[in-house]
Each structure stands twice: as C-alpha cells, then as structure tokens.
Amino acid sequence: MSLDDWQLVVGLEVHAELATNTKIFCGCANSFGDEPNTNVCPVCLGLPGSLPVLNRSAVEFAARLGMALECTVQPSVFHRKNYFYPDMPKDYQVSQYDLPINADGTLELPDGSVVGIERAHLEEDTGKTTHMGGGGRIHDAAYSLVDYNRAGVPLVEIVSRPDIRTPEQAQAYATELRAILAATGVSDAKMEEGSMRVDANVSMHKPGEPYGTRCEIKNLNSVRSLGRAIRYEMERQVQLLESGERIVQETRHWDEDAGRTRPGRSKEQAEDYRYFQEPDLVPVAPDDEWLASIRAAMPMLPAARRTRLAAQTGGDVDVALVVERGLDDLVLEAIAAGGDPGRLLVHASNNLSAGAGELSARPFAELSKLEATGALTATQAKTVLAELVTAGGDPAAIAATRGFEAMGDDALAAAVDAAIAADPEAWEKFKAGDRKVTGFFVGLVMKTTKGKADGKAVTALLDARAQS
Amino acid sequence: MTTAQQIADAVRAGERSASEVLEEHLAVIDEREGDVHAFNLVMRDEARAAAVAVDAGDRTGALAGVPVALKDNLCTRGIPTTCSSRILEGWRPPYDATVVARLAAAGAVFVGKTNLDEFAMGSSTENSAFGPTRNPHDLDRVPGGSSGGSAAAVAAGFAPLALGSDTGGSIRQPAALCGVVGLKPTYGLVSRYGLVAFASSLDQIGPFAATVADAALLLEVIAGHDPLDSTSLDRPLPPLVSGLGDGVEGLRVGVLTELVHAEGIAPDVRRRVEAAAEALADAGAKVDEASVPAASFGLSAYYLIAPAEASSNLARYDGVRYGLRVDAENTAEMNAATRTAGFGPEVKRRIMLGTYALSAGYYDAYYGKAQQVRTLIIRDFAAAYDSFDVLLCPTSPTTAFRLGDKTADPMSMYLNDVCTIPSNLAGDPAISVPFGAGDDGLPVGVQLLGPALSEATLLRTAAVLEGALQ
C-alpha cells in the first residue's frame, strides 16, 4: 500500500456555540455547566403551544462571523429538520437550509492556502443525553437522563468546501477558525467543552480521477484528534480501495483511546429530514445600516494581527502562537514603550502560556531592557516575569528584592577562572575542542555565583580563555 | 338571553355580581351538559374563585364577570390541557396562552375547557378521545368541529362567549351548525402563543358568541400584537364594536360563484345564501357575482399543507417529557408505542399523509405544488378584492349531520370544509353568521369573507344580516 498514489480530500463541518447571553429563541440563559434543567422554559422545552422568537444577538454574531469569513451576508429563512431524538424537545431542529445567512466565503490559513466556505448558517443546539447503567452507551444503558440547558443554545454551522488536502491543513483550518471565533467574540470555541465541534468528511482518490466516496468522522474533541483521525481514515480507506473494495458512505466515530474510527448507526444513511420552511418564524432580512454597523465594529482578525506583529519584529519567533494567545497587543505596546522586540517575543511565546495576568506593557518593556543590557540574566528575567504576571509591579524593584544584581565583569571573570582551576582535567578537554564539557563549567559558575551569572557571558569567557 | 355586553355592563354598574352570573350559567351547565358534553372540564372551583376576585376587585375590565369557555387546545396554567387526546394525559401547562392572559386581565371568568376533535383535526367533534359533543339543537346531530364544544357551549347557554381555533373552518363550520356567530381573524391578528399547534401557518384563534356585537367585543379583547408570536401583526386594529351599526350602504358584495356552486352544497343552504344576498342588497349594498377561480383547489392544497405541518408539530408527543408514556425496550420503540396508544385514527392518518407529502422525492409533487396553489389562491382573492369589499358564500355545505354519518368516509368529512378552507390558505378573515334554517329546521350559517384586517367591515355586514332576521 502506498499513500503516495492517493490524494486526500477533506471538507470540515464546524459547529460553534454563539456566546450570546440568552438562547436563540427564548430568554433563557446561555450558560455552560449549570445544574441540569435549570435554564429552561416552555419555548426551549418545546412545550405544546410555545413559539420561538429569534434572538437579535444571535443574528448579529452570525453576521459578524460571516463578515470575518468574507461571506455574502444575505436575507435568510429558517427550516425545520425533522427527526426523532430524545434530547431534541420538539423532535425537529430549527435550522437553515437553502437560504443560509452566510454563503460563499473563504478562510486563508497561515501558510497562505485558502479554503472555501460554502455556508455558515444559524441553528439551535439540542439537549444533552447521559446514558446511565450498562456500558454508558445508548444500546446497553438501563435508562437515560436528558439535560435541556443546552437545548436552544444558538449555533453556527460552518461548512467548508472540500478544499483541504492534508491532515495538517485540516488542523490549521480548525485552529484558524477557532482563533477567528474567539477574536470576533462570536464563540468561546472550546473543543474540550463542546462549544466548538468539528466533523470531518474524508475521502481518497487518485489524482485526475473523480473524488472518492466520503465518510463523515464525528466525536473529534481536539485539533490533535482531528489530525489523528484523518490519518487513520486515510490508511483505512486506501487499504480498502487497494484491495478492490468500495468505501461505504457512512458516519464514523473517532475512538481516541483506541486510535481508530468505528462505524456509527447504519440507519443514519437512510434518514430523510423532510425539511420545510419553519412557519413559526418570519424571514430574516437584516437592514444594510445594521450590517454596516456590525462591519464597522469588527475587531482585527488573527491573520492581520500576525502580519502586523511579524512586521514589527522580523518574525523569527512563532508570531502565530503569540497571536493565538492574544498577547500581540501587549507585545506591540511594550515595543512602543521602548522594549526589546526579541526578548519580548521570546517571553510571549515561551513564558506566558497561561496568559499575561497582571503584566502590563510598561513593566514588560522595562524587563526586556534590563535583560538586553545584561542587568538581568535570562533565568532571572523569567523569575521576575512570573512575579509580574501574578502580582504586577516594577521589574527593577522586584529584581532588587530578590538580590538579582548585575554581576560585574571582573567578578564574572574571577568566577570563571576559579571554575577552570577547580578541574584542570576537564579544562584540557575543553581546550582540545570537546564542547560537551561547556555545560559542566557553566553549571559550576552558576553554582558559585548563585545563578547571577549570565550563561552566554560565561560561555564567551570560556572560549576567550581557551584561545588565549 | 343575556349578552356578554349586558353582563359586563351590569357587573361594571354594580347591578349584578360576577358570582351571581356564574351560578346562573353553572345551573344551565348542570342541567344540560350531561346531554351535550361540550366540556372536557368544567372549572367550577376556579371559576367561582375568579368570580369572587372580580367582585372584590375592580370591575372595569371589558369582560368583567363574563363567563367564557375555552377550547381545550388553549394552554391554561395548572389546568389540564388535553387537545381531546390521550397523549396529553396528565399534562398541566406551566403557562397561560396569551389570549387566556388577556381575557383574565379583562375580568373574564373561565367556566371550562371545551371538547374538540383531537388536536383540532376534524369537522364533527367525533374525533375526541373523551367522546363526541352533541348539537344542542338536536342531540342526534354533530355540533360541527373541530371547535364543536365551544360552539355547543354558546348555543346551549353554558357561556355567552367562547374561544375556538380555526385551521380550515374549525370556528366557522361549528358556528354555522350550532346557530351562533364565529369569526376567524386575519392570520397574525390574534397571538397563537399558547395555542397547541395543528398547522402553524393556518391556525388562528377566534371568538364564538350568540350575537355579532359580542363576537366583536371578544375579538377586541384578544386581538393585538404579541412579542411572543413572531407571526403576530404589529398593526393597530380599527375599533370593532363602535362601527357595528354603520350599515352596508354602497358596500360592494360579491357572491362567490365557485363556493356557492361547489360540490355538495345543499339546495336549502344555497337558498339561504341567496336570501342573504338579497337582504344585503335591500340594505343598500351593491351585490354582484364574484369569482375566485383558485378557491376550487383549496381543499386539495389544504389536505397537503395542514397534515405536513401537523406531522412536524405533533412529533414532540414522544413520551419523553410529558403526557402519556408507554414503556418499551428502547427509546425508538417507546416513541412508537406511546404514539400508537396515544393518538386516535384521524391524527395518525394526517401524520402519515403529511410525512409522505414532505418526503424526499415527493415534496415537489405534493407539498411544493400545494404551496403554489396557495400562492394562486392569495392572488385570486386579492384580484377579487379589487372589485369587492366583501365576499358571500355558504359556511358549511349542509346543516348539522347525524353522529356517525361521515365517520366511515374521511373524504366526505373533509368536504365539509370546502367553503371555509380558502380563507385560511389566504390568511384573510371570515365570519359565519346564522341566517335562518334549512329544510330540516336546523340552523344555517352564511359566510362573509374580506381582505386582511377587514374584520370591522365583516362584523358590520354580519350585523346587517343579524338585524334582517329579526
């Protein structure tokens, strides 16, 4: 079997919960993790006689996302998607069908590739079923409990075109979309909490031939799972195709522990949703003025923020990661306050994974200057930074409190000489070009100076001594 | 007979108490309800408490102390709401329908929940899980349907006012058969919030009353924009009661050919329509023949659109959350067992019909085509209203038929709605007003149709017919 003979084709369907205060068709709170069945009312429980009223914020959020994805934001209508499921209170889902609010957009990935967006439409979420007893699956459970807090939470379903060609590109798409959802405030987009859910349509074909039959992979709980599942599915499908078998169009579930996909319920493929226009709602026709105000309030998107940061710093560091963490504004402000761009970026990408906390631009800039001038070593700077994140303050003062003073050149030279004298044998090796013992000497100097020495300066001194 | 207006005036003036009025009506109920079976539930205790509250509180509401019967598909907080179906067994809504809340605020006293064809599907009130309602004029005959209980309640004097719902004639046809006034308002004029849905794009709540003026009074109380119903119209309705005596001088009345001569219209009913046309002409109206060609296809289109929407609206009765549950091995089987046991045959027939009409491969031929017919009906009515202010036709093809006469043949039952359905498809208002009797001595209603929001015109025209009889 050779994957090289085959071309992967992937299209992604992403469901994102909108971060509105209330649900899409009623006034119940849209909030995650509350006591089961506390955020419910006749409307989201689908009680007889209740009627939906569309939440204006949900339309606004969806339109904002549509604009961020370069979609045409258009008049739309809601349809009913009919099927029976216990966590769906009305046994139909109110969704959009042939006239979605957003159509025909694009998403540009950090590597410059562009994935087409077919549509990004509004719909309501379902409740959540927990199967009790047995193996915790619907088939062998003794009974099931349903929590309708999530029923009626607004969703956008973003459907990409089948433009994705590698697992890495699929991961980059999911990552970039997540960043856009977060940057625009449209969604928390947390895959682990289910506020962003990714399904992948995967098929394999030989270049020049028509697309193959696709399988829809569900239950992907992280960007990592997405990549793993696609890779697994590539191998599975190619194996079948090369042994002359056909791919069955089906839904498959990713099993994270087993590292494989499994077929879902077979009856799903025969489902007929009997879509028809939702008679309880009227068409949505946002006026141009309102749309213009949404567009005017659009925040800067991740792609533009990456370009802006890279332009400031030369872009040797992982600017994408810094933007993803939302630290780019802080770094840029610190640069504007006279900070050292290189040191700031290193900290933002390596030492601020949990966020900036109490750290503000000016102290951050000061810290980078202390470091750049050699007043603080990298290790000391990291310690001071941690304190700035938890409590804020003045970096120089923190350094003084901790006894982090600049080490004079003479003192450093004395410490290095003492280290050399301490182990002549190792020193001979160093002089002979064995750089493996560098670490030994640096460690020794650090120990005697109690960490005040700068590692790079020590190495430079050792080199100078060896050549003289 | 005491009208709702007279009761409200007397209670407001302190001449009568709401409790006194209520006891009189409860006495009539005690006397005849055993024969008529208009109610699924007589709310004696709640009504007495409400009457006491009216008497103790301010009596200025438009309906202060007036007994009102509610069709049992209108949600009443804490009071069983059954839709005459086993499947809603035990369910008590946690909220009031908007119309119920408005009536309560106006001082109305609810005497009970009235019987109906299950989920409002039928034309005789025989499709009720709790047994049929009988016509107070002849207990061997049906009251019509689906709001047969509300029509019978008003006709029997159980309450001067009642609310019904009309999806294809369910207010007007029973009004005609029971000899009372029934009005289906413009779609969107009355909030549907709290009306258990049959076919959402057609359903509309409306009044039953013994007189045209009382129907106008009740409609004024329940009409008006409701933010809880997205299809509710956000336009003010012209006053209804104050213009009732304005007459029909110069009004252009069209006798609607396609419906006067539709299949199955009995000669005695047709004669009453002709007499109504004469009465209006005598009163100064300009009467001519009118044509709405597409109206002839109304029945066929309706029996695709209404079941299609019903198949979706009734999906929620699955045994999971409320009402009946018949346990089974797994969820899908529990759903099926519950629905098999809980729904009657007519409801099942329409769910199957509607499911089929929406299915992939059939949608275009059935549901899609029916929607096109609906568009044509709207267009043809609009054209007719260029030349006419009001259209006149029968309400029901015949007077009240005998119980059991049409239960074996659904098609013959469906044909009862041939004259009423077009207004639902068009979304326009229509009123049925009693206009004499047929050869069998039973009441005949004639129907007046008008363009959207023409309720005031329809009511004053109906008032002229009402006056012509006296």
Image (tube, rainbow, N blue to C red):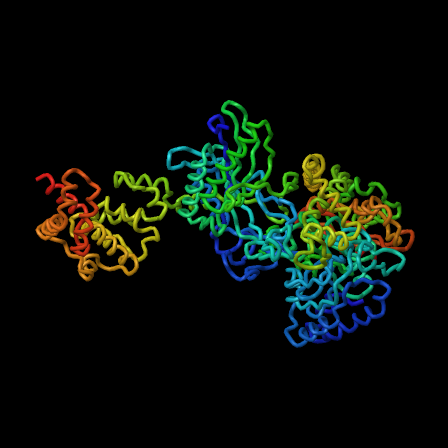
Quadrant showing the C terminus of chain A: top left
Residue B462 at least partly seen: no
Which residue is pictured at 83% across the width and 44% down the height?
B411
Q: Nearer the viewer, residue B403 or B376?
A: B403
Residue A267 at least partly seen: yes
Q: Is residue A355 left or right of residue B461?
A: left
Q: Position of residue B28 (x, y in %)?
A: 82, 69
Q: Position of residue A223 (x, y in %)?
A: 45, 43
Which residue is pictured at 70% across the width and 59% down the height?
B323
Residue that protrudes farthest toward the bottom in the picture: B56
Residue that protrudes farthest toward the right in the picture: B440
Residue that protrudes farthest toward the top in the picture: A208
Residue that protrudes farthest toward the front in the picture: A425
Q: Nearer the viewer, residue A9 or A124?
A: A9
Which residue is pictured at 50% across the width and 58% down the height?
A33
Q: Position of residue A172 (x, y in %)?
A: 42, 39
Q: Residue B376 lies in what quarter of the image?
A: top right
In the image, residue B65 sits, relative to residue A321, either above or below, namely below
In the rendered picture of this protein, how many numbered marks are placed on residues? Answer: 0
Q: Is residue A406 left or right of residue A27?
A: left
In the image, residue B369 sits, relative to residue A350, either above or below, namely above
Q: Nearer the viewer, residue A389 or B99?
A: A389
Q: Nearer the viewer, residue B200 or A349?
A: A349
